Image (cartoon, rainbow, N blue to C red):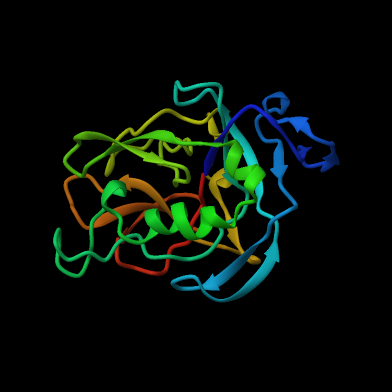
Amino acid sequence: QVRTKAVAGIAFAGESAQQYSKKAISDLNFGDKVEDKSWTWEHKTRDDYTGSGTVKPVTWIVVAKNHYGEDSGVTLLSQELIGRYMFDNSTNVHPYNGSNHWGNSNHIRPWLNSSFYNTFSEEFKNAVLTTNVPNKTYENADYVTKDNVFIPSTTELGDEDYTITYKIGEVYPFFAGAANERRIAKLGSNNSTYWTRSPRSRLEDLLICILANGSQGEKMRSENSCAIYNN
């Protein structure tokens, strides 16, 4: 996901895909969609962002506005999963299994903020705001990262079951009161499990993911089997 300035952009509203020309993003409603057709992304479907996939512009959903208390930004979440990638495989925290802290990620976080981010057009990059992203450790300690691109927490996706994780941030209005069905996301033609940045409470090598049916699950951070639903 990304947070953008409330500026003009190529957008279409709702499921009707009604086309607008340079409509201000801030004028869109929650659930409306935004595209920049001047750049494309290959939605590869195999582990570690390999294989092949459909090449097309990324479609973004308007999920929140002024959400992080900074500037007048609009939070956009990709409508589809953009690929499969490992969260972390560092051995200095927990041998072989990696870290479940978004701030420590040596795979997905730098990849999103470099390889993925650098495919954006210059106009789209110029609209992206660096966000102070709220996080927690598996021991429930707060910390903040600065990111141009980041993945959502379970809280932000409207899943407020904290049996095995913590409240991180606030619910995006688009997901307020949402059932599991709204959290289902596809990679290619199939529903897929995807990462969140919510750690498993009291365990340092497990991270909460959203399963193919939209419910909570957990995976080892070093697994390649989860896809990326990104802000």
User: Residue furthest toward the bottom?
Assistant: 51
Q: Residue at x 23, y 62 (%)?
A: 98
Task: For residue 126, say whether it is visible.
Answer: yes
Q: Residue at x 67, y 25 (%)?
A: 26
Quadrant for residue 223, please give it: bottom left
The picture places residue 116, in percent across and down from the top left corner, at 52, 57
The residue closer to the viewer here, 224 or 149, is: 149
In the rendered picture of this protein, how many numbered marks are placed on residues? 0
- The answer to whether 222 is drawn above or below residue 46 in the figure is above
- In the displayed structure, does residue 161 sit left or right of residue 122? left
Q: Residue at x 52, y 62 (%)?
A: 192
- The answer to whether 179 is drawn above or below residue 195 in the figure is above
The picture places residue 93, in percent across and down from the top left corner, at 15, 58
- In the displayed structure, does residue 108 sit left or right of residue 40? left
Quadrant for residue 124, please give it: top right
The picture places residue 94, in percent across and down from the top left corner, at 15, 62
The residue closer to the viewer here, 178 or 98, is: 98
The picture places residue 128, in percent across and down from the top left corner, at 55, 38
Task: For residue 213, say whether it is visible.
Answer: no
- The answer to whether 100 is drawn above or below residue 137 in the figure is below
Q: Residue at x 50, y 50 (%)?
A: 214
The residue closer to the viewer here, 166 or 108, is: 108
